[in-house]
Image (spheres, helix red, strand yellow):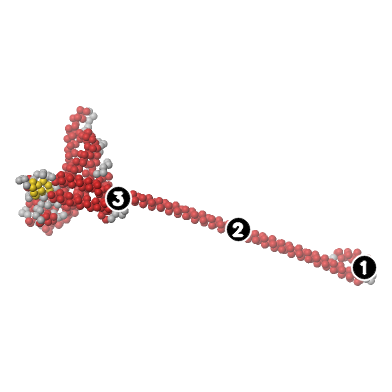
Amino acid sequence: MAATYETGGEYIKHHLVNLTYGQYPDGSWGFAQSAAEAKQMGFWAIHVDSMAWAIGLGALFVGLFARAAKRAHAGVPGGFQNFVEQIIEFIDNTVRDSFTHKNRIIAPLALCSFIWIFLMNLMDLVPVDWVPYLFSLIGVHYMKIVATTDPNVTMGMSLSVFAMMLYYSLKCKGVGGFLGELTLHPFTAKNIVVKVLLIPINFFLEAVALLAKPISHGLRLFGNLYAGEMIFILIALLPLWAQWTLSVPWAIFHVLVITLQAFIFMVLTVVYLNMAHDTAH
Amino acid sequence: MNINLTIIGQAISFAIFVWFCMRFVWPPVINALEARKKRIADGLADAEAAAADREKATQEASQTMTEAREEAARVLAQAERRAGEIVEEAKVEAEATAERTAARAQAEIEQQEQQARERLRGEVAALAVAGAEAVLRREVDAQAHAKALDEVAGRL
């Protein structure tokens, strides 16, 4: 495949551009034809490939699981129902271990993050050129099939979790409690004057800690998958006979990475929301 | 690498999928799992109860068996004792009957002997008288000697 590009660098760059739909500088709407054009479109553009793969895989996941859930019964489970039950039981145990409050949304949220991210990560194992090549045949020149290598996707999810963290913090602790948590820790003092003096320092530290959560949450997933994808692209630049010697071990190792990253995202979601519910501070 | 509307699109999709999971996926499966857990727990409890029942039944059966065996032994012993008693009674009765028969025979024998003796005495007396008569017809008066003859007859 690399032969159709002028240089390896161009090949890599081409594989890192999303199929972007947005407004051209002249005011008309359409797909960006180059990375520079996509950049120019600014915020009011959308990555059609990321969204399509994300929503497609999400729909596949909820469709299959809802089908199994609809047929769920207390008798002996069949093949796919058993599989779904295993996953749900696993998620349920994980949530029970790390979430100490009562909230009906947490377990489904964890399930959804885990399976959805896992499926999106799984697309990383599809050889890097297959799907883009198929789309190039129908005239679509950019196609990134691994939605989690798009920071918009991972940050979109982590910021959703962050919004929930803020909501439950305010709901469980109240405005005063939440502000107190942000300003009266980690440094405390008995003397009221010192206490007031410590407020800016505490607030700075706590604000950094709070904001670091969604950013690290989203970027961790993005970084791992982006790096993995990049290695696959680099391996694809090798001569054809040498590719499998590297891509097979990396793919095997990557099976671990994609599962682990999906799991980490889920666990952090649960842990962050548990912290948001904690009132004893 | 550009940050754009996709971030909002993803957040909306995420919210929708989570809502869908919460509404249609999680509750039915978790309920089924709970129901199965309960069913299994009930089954195990039933099995335990059944095992306890069986244990009890076995104990009762063995107790009944022991009682029956004791009863049988008791009945057997009683029957043996009774049999012994019957044999003993029969023996005693037989002995008594034999004794009685022997006594009766003895009495009869004695009686007949007595009768025979009486008759013999009478006959001997008559014979002696006849003999004496024949001897004395000529020389003694029967009446005069009757007393002496009676004495002789009495000594027989």
Q: Amino acid at mark 2?
A: Arg
At horizontal 16% and vertical 56% (from top left) the residue drawn is: A248
| Crowd band around label 1 with a 10 angstrom C-alpha radius: few (<14), some (14–19), many (20+) | some
Instruction: Return the residue found at the far front.
Output: A28
Q: How many marks can you see? A: 3
Q: CA distance from mark 2 to mark 3?
A: 73 Å
For label 3, the SS is helix
- Tag nearer the camera, 2 or 3: 3
Q: Which residue is mark 3?
A: B32
First in sequence, mark 1 or 3: give its number: 3
Left or right: residue A101 versus residue A214 is: right
Return the residue nearer the eye: A97 or A250: A97
Q: CA distance from mark 1 to mark 3?
A: 148 Å
- x and y, in percent, of residue A108 in the image: 24, 46
Type of the residue with mark 1: Ala
Q: Nearer the viewer, mark 1 or mark 3?
A: 3
Circle 1 is placed at which residue position? B142
Q: Which residue is mark 2?
A: B82
Q: Is residue A20 left or right of residue A119?
A: left
Q: Do the residues indicated by labels 1 and 2 lie within the same chain of the protein? A: yes
Quadrant for the N terminus of chain A in the image: bottom left
Q: Evaluate if marks 1 and 3 touch, with contact meaning CB atoms under 8 Å apart.
A: no
Secondary structure under badge 1?
A: helix
Of the two numbered discs 1 and 2 on the same chain, state the one appearing first in sequence: 2
Name the amino acid, label 3: Ala
Quarter assignment of residue A280: top left
Whether marks 1 and 3 lie on the same chain: yes
Q: Which residue is nearer to you in this view: A233 or A114?
A: A114
Alpha carbon separation for disc pair 1 and 2: 76 Å
Is A242 rendered above or below residue A96? below
